[in-house]
Image (spheres, rainbow, N blue to C red):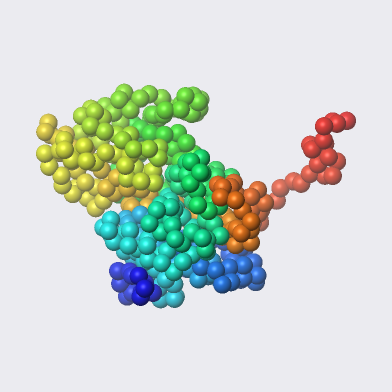
């Protein structure tokens, strides 16, 4: 790619509508705006290149623009071909950003866009799910010596990077932004919980109240999905492999059982495990006519659509983003968004205020990498506590809230062995 184009998008004429979306997001992201002021004044990314692979929609656009205000040369691509919003991509190109993504790209095009985003030789990578990390640890390892480090947005991505670290193969230091308190407590739980159901309701136009909802996985994201379903009047079943999380689900008032047991009971199934083959042939055979299945995990492997297609006598479009698989007994299994991330493939993703916190963490973590990357070992690091605290403090300030502070005596008491 010696002659790398400045962008590869669907249509630059879509830019005006995309700019409206970006403007709306920006005005509702007070924490990121505060971070932007600091980055603009100090230019910590001056002379640095940042490759970003995150869902290309309005909130991500705000992050990319803020990084550029901090002095960075930014190249952006998506991390899921169905979550790219072509009008937002066009608006960023119109504002001079390097952008490589098209909604609905086939696997070959999607990979090419990832490669194009890396082609200018990044110093810092911001990843969502580890797609750039996959390339940097294989075909694009020649780019690693120049790198200062990376930030990872998702549970799935952090998990895979930790496996690389355990195997002694992690090629650069990584900040696990996903594990920050202001990420997993709010983005994963409240953001996923709301955005998944917003997407399901908009896609199906069906009521949630009174339905039997099956949530596969009771991590932070699963907790949010179950909480919102319960709040809207659904009866919720949780399936789990972790005995402690299963006990927690019971204590929260949910039924707990295996997917085998839940399959004939559910009206709506939401997978959010990060693992493959959560719903397979044996489950499809037991499901009700009209059962709705969707995925809120990062990759489209949780619902085995190959097996479903093998069972089906017919596949037909029932509604935009709803495919119906007709079984030989006449039942129809409904799949939303091709089994991809339903909240982004069928919606706008997390609420703006949630991503305000997450992307403020990303911007600050990238600054930390810029300042300290040369001295960091090849390790997956927790987000520095000071960064987490600052995001919380900025949000409280934006909401006009105050909290107590320890007096010197209280600070001594809580940090002292001598409790007198």
Q: Residue at x 16, y 35 (%)?
A: 311
Side (left or right) of 269 relative to 256: left
Side (left or right) of 78 relative to 411: left
**Does residue 367 appear anywhere in the picture?**
no
Q: Give residue 283's position: percent from left, percent from top.
A: 26, 30
Q: Give residue 52's position: percent from left, percent from top.
A: 46, 61
Residue 305, by quadrant, is top left
Q: Residue at x 85, y 31 (%)?
A: 418
- Quadrant where the N terminus lies? bottom left
Vertical arrangement, residue 244 with respect to residue 194, above or below: above
Q: Residue at x 22, y 41 (%)?
A: 306
Closest to the observer, 141 or 308: 141
- Quadrant where the C terminus lies? top right
Residue 302, by quadrant, is top left
Closest to the observer, 290 or 301: 301
Q: Residue at x 37, y 60 (%)?
A: 114
Q: Give residue 147's position: percent from left, percent from top.
A: 52, 61
């Amino acid at each position: 790619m010696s002659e790398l184009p400045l962008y590869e998008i669907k249509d630059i004429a879509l830019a005006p509508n995309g700019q409206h979306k970006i403007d709306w997001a920006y005005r509702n992201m007070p924490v990121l705006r505060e971070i932007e002021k600091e980055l603009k004044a100090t230019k910590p990314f001056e002379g640095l290149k940042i490759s970003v692979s995150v869902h290309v929609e309005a909130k991500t656009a705000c992050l990319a623009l803020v990084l550029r205000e901090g002095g960075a040369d930014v190249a952006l691509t998506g991390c899921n071909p169905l979550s790219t919003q072509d009008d937002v991509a066009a608006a960023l190109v119109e504002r001079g950003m390097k952008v490589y993504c098209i909604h609905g790209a086939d696997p070959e095009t999607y990979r090419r866009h990832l490669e194009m985003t890396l082609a200018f030789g990044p110093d810092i990578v911001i990843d969502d799910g580890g797609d750039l990390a996959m390339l940097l640890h294989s075909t694009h390892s020649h780019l690693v010596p120049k790198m200062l480090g990376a930030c990872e947005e998702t549970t799935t991505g952090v998990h895979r990077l930790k496996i690389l670290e355990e195997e002694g193969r992690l090629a650069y230091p990584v900040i696990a932004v996903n594990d920050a308190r202001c990420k997993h407590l709010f983005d994963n739980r409240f953001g996923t919980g709301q955005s998944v159901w917003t997407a399901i309701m908009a896609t199906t136009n069906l009521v949630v109240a009174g339905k039997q909802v099956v949530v596969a996985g009771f991590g932070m994201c699963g907790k949010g999905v179950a909480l919102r379903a319960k709040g809207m009047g659904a009866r919720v079943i949780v399936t789990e492999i972790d005995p402690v999380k299963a006990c927690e689900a019971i204590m929260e008032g949910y039924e707990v059982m295996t997917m085998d047991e839940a399959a004939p009971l559910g009206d709506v199934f939401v997978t959010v495990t990060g693992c493959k083959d959560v719903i397979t042939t044996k489950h499809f055979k037991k499901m009700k006519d009209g059962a709705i299945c969707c995925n809120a995990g990062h990759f489209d492997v949780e619902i085995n659509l190959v097996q479903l297609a093998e069972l089906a006598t017919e596949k037909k479009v029932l509604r935009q983003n709803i495919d119906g698989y007709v079984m030989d007994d006449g039942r129809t299994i409904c799949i939303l968004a091709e089994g991809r991330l339903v909240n982004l493939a069928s919606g706008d993703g997390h609420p703006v205020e949630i991503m305000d916190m997450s992307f403020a963490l990303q911007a600050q973590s990238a600054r930390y990498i810029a300042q300290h990357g040369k001295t960091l070992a090849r390790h997956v690091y927790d987000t520095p506590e000071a960064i987490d605290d600052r995001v919380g403090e900025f949000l409280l300030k934006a909401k006009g809230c105050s909290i107590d502070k320890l007096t010197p005596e209280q600070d001594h008491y809580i940090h002292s062995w001598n409790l007198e």
